[in-house]
Amino acid sequence: MIVMSDSKNQARELLERALDFEAVERSAFLAGAGGNDVDLRRRIEDLLLAHEARRRFEHHLADTAVVH
């Protein structure tokens, strides 16, 4: 079993909660939920960008598969 540090657990929890918000609402959520931890907020924002890029790529693949 892998034991994650509190920081990783907090990041995972915030990421999951942030994904429940529309993109325009996430910044306000992270500002309140992340407190003054700028590094944590940056980490979550990077993960959200990666998540969005993956989502767009998957949609592109799905669209391409339908066309061909």
Image (tube, rainbow, N blue to C red):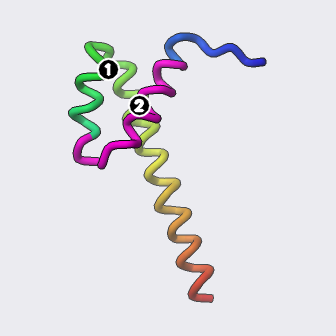
Question: From the image, which quarter does the C terminus lie in?
Answer: bottom right
Q: Residues within 10 Å of mark 1 (few under 14, many from 20)?
A: some
Distance of label 2 from label 1 (alpha carbons): 9 Å
The type of residue carrying mark 1 is Gly
The type of residue carrying mark 2 is Ile
Task: Check the image and name the residue furthest to the bottom.
Answer: 68
Q: Is residue 25 left or right of residue 37?
A: left
- Residue 12, given in percent of the width and then of the height, sits at 51, 27
Q: Which residues are magenta?
A: 9-25
Residue 44 has which mark?
Answer: 2
Of residues 47 and 24, the one nearer the viewer is: 24
Residue found 24% across the figure and 23% down from its top? 32
Which comes sooner in the sequence, label 2 or label 1?
A: 1
Residue found 53% across the figure and 77% down from its top? 63
18 inside magenta stretch: yes
Q: Are marks 2 and 1 in contact (CB under 8 Å)?
A: yes
**67 relative to 13, above or below:** below
